[in-house]
Image (cartoon, rainbow, N blue to C red):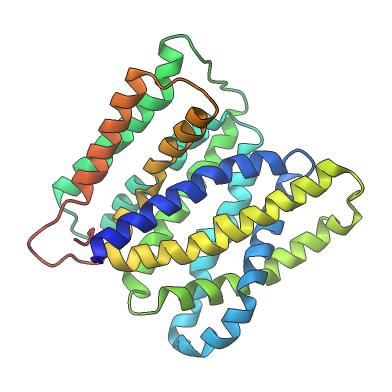
Amino acid sequence: MSNKFISWVIFVILCFIWGSSFKLMKDSAIALNASQIASLRIFAAGVVFIPFAFFHFSKIPRQKMGTVILSAVFGNLIPAFLFAGAMTKIDGSLGGILNSLTPICVVVIGILFFKDKIKAQKITGVIIGFIGLVLLTISPVLIGEKNISFDNMNYLFLILGATLLYGLNVNMVSHYLKGLNPIHVATVSLAFMTIPAGIILWQQDVTQLDFHKIEVRYAVMASAGLGVLGSAIATALFYILVQKAGGLFASLVTYGIPFIALFWGFLDNEKISVIEIVCLMIILFGVYLANRSEKKKATPADVAS
């Protein structure tokens, strides 16, 4: 199988995982606060990877270890708390739009701080995809089928902060960790995160929760599942995708999340409108344009063929 085919398979899997993560986050909020959700998520992800990290630790050069740990802090630990804090307070549609700023943050941070030279075609694709996503989100509002709540707007800055950190992390991984095995990076980096996550869990008195209540057990299971799927497995796949297809294409996964939301809605007998299909086509065209094959060899900042 070609690298391009494998990259697209990973892309779709990540869309499914992260597209479902928002529901798990909402389910967790039934009985847990934001700090409990985030710390349990990262702790569960780290615990799953600890057995592997013992074998992979020695495979990472000592001079790269600081960057590996920093990648987990910027790409997992801090965003987990920012998202958990925001998604329990704001409209999910607005959160989805801001989350999809990640590819734009990758481009801007790459150009400003990493001196990347990104082709106009790729930037155009990112912008077109983002326009399609915004139109998809607001189209139900424009035709009167849905209202978007603008309550607690200050919490939007939490998601904006998370997308900036994602953009920084993608560039760090693309530039400084490109020669390392992505599985080794994922397991070791998240294993280290059990320390801060465990401390916060202890401070949050998670053991004092009333586990006799079914909603508490379900919320804890949802947060743990969020960690295993949305952080552990997804991080490993994401690092593989960055190495195979470049940081920009990997970040475009955020554009695929609406497809998953519509997919679950379709299974739940919700109707998909012509406007939604057109918006999805716009998003797909943007992703295609940003990842279209080039004759010259791609740089880490570009999307590989």
Q: Looking at the image, which residue sits at the far top?
A: 144
On screen, residue 84 versus residue 243, left or right, reads right
Residue drawn at the location 22% of the way across and 45% of the way down: 288
x and y percentages locating residue 272 in the rendered image = 41, 22
x and y percentages locating residue 157 in the rendered image = 53, 39
The answer to whether residue 123 is visible is: no
Residue drawn at the location 71% of the way across and 46% of the way down: 34
Return the residue nearer the eye: 67 or 246: 246
On screen, residue 65 versus residue 174, left or right, reads right
Does residue 178 lie above or below 131 as drawn?
A: below
Does residue 111 lie above or below 160 as drawn?
A: below
On screen, residue 7 versus residue 69, left or right, reads left
Residue drawn at the location 19% of the way across and 61% of the way down: 305
- Which image quarter: residue 256? top left
Total tally of numbered discs in the picture: 0
- Which image quarter: residue 240? bottom left
x and y percentages locating residue 190 in the rendered image = 58, 70
The answer to whether residue 78 is visible is: yes
Residue drawn at the location 20% of the way across and 66% of the way down: 299
Does residue 289 lie above or below 299 as drawn?
A: above
x and y percentages locating residue 161 in the rendered image = 50, 47
